[in-house]
Image: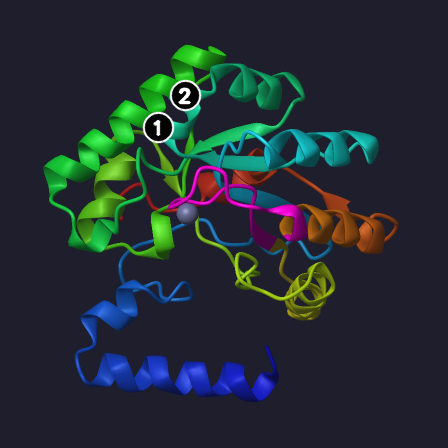
Amino acid sequence: MTTGVYAALGAAACAGLAAGGYQYASLWPGSRIFGEALTAPSRPGELALTFDDGPNRHWTPRLLDTLASHDVQATFFLLGNRAEAQPELVRRIAAAGHLIGNHTWDHPNLSRSSARRIREELARTSATLEQITGAPVRFFRPPFGARRPAAFRIAREMGLIPVLWNAMTSDWSEPSADRIAQQLGAKIDRARERGRAANIVLHDGGHRDPNANREQSVTAAQMLIERYKATCKFVKLDAWADDVAALPTQA
Ligand SMILES: [Zn+2]
């Protein structure tokens, strides 16, 4: 994404808010108006690779092999229904030392969900993940980045830290791994210039298609690791625990 497009999006976001654009604001990842979430702390040079919408029977194992070959650990925001269907794969992710987070049971838009539905989505997913891995789940990423005050408040009441991002591209629809890596690289470099860490989103799964082809996303992850391994530090989100502790306890 070029700077021009960025500026245009920023202007559009402001216009949307000025016009009372509730929906636009709730879908805008840079927005903080609906409560605090972990985005990227002031730790330039730290990169958190995060993977959403898995586990994916075919591509998650390939991704795990890639990460292992570079001795890099990452964070996986899993869908509860996919985890339940593939508990062995979830255990493999955990056994490799990666961090597992909650991405809801079946990927609803939480800005359109009732409080009861939000609670059920989060509770059922955490319970399933904890039962499979034996480890507590601390982090939660809302599907589509969509949120409203209730979603963040409920998550925090349940002991979950809401997580957004500052480096994402449409890796599910881009024409090539090169392009995905190039676009994310520009955002990673920009974050570093601004004195921030990079919280990078890629998708090893697809919330609509459990067998979605994620070859390009996995290849792009490898390219980013090769590009930044010598100069940056790859971390899991729990490395930013001090920054999480600094967030207010109420959204
Ligand atoms: Zn998702």
Viewer-proximal residue among 199 and 36: 199
Q: Which residues are magenta?
A: 199-216
User: Residue 85 has which mark?
Assistant: 2
Viewer-proximal residue among 184 and 220: 220
Alpha-carbon span between mark 1 and mark 2? 6 Å
- Image marks 1 and 2: residues in contact by CB distance under 8 Å: yes
User: Where is 149 relative to 156, above or below?
Assistant: below
At label 2, counting other C-alpha atoms closer than 10 Å, the crowd grade (few under 14, some 14-19, many 20 or more) is: few
Left or right, 193 with reference to 5: right
What is the three-letter code of the residue carrying label 2?
Answer: Ala
User: Where is 2 relative to 138, above or below?
Assistant: below
Which quarter of the figure has residue 27?
A: bottom left
User: Where is 128 relative to 104, above or below?
Assistant: above
* Residue 70, image x, y percentages: 82, 36
Visual colour scheme: rainbow
Viewer-proximal residue among 198 and 245: 198
Q: Name the residue located 23 percent from the left edge and 46 percent from the top edge.
A: 151
Residue 169 in view, yes or no? yes
Provide the major secondary structure of the magenta segment.
loop
User: Where is 170 relative to 150, above or below?
Assistant: below
Task: Judge whether residue 59 is colored magenta.
Answer: no
Left or right, 227 with reference to 186: right
Residue projecting furthest to the right: 230
What is the three-letter code of the residue carrying label 1?
Answer: Asn
Question: What residue is pinned by disc 1?
Answer: 81
* Residue 64, image x, y percentages: 68, 30
Which quarter of the figure has residue 167?
A: bottom right
Residue 137 in view, yes or no? no
Q: Secondary structure at mark 1?
A: helix
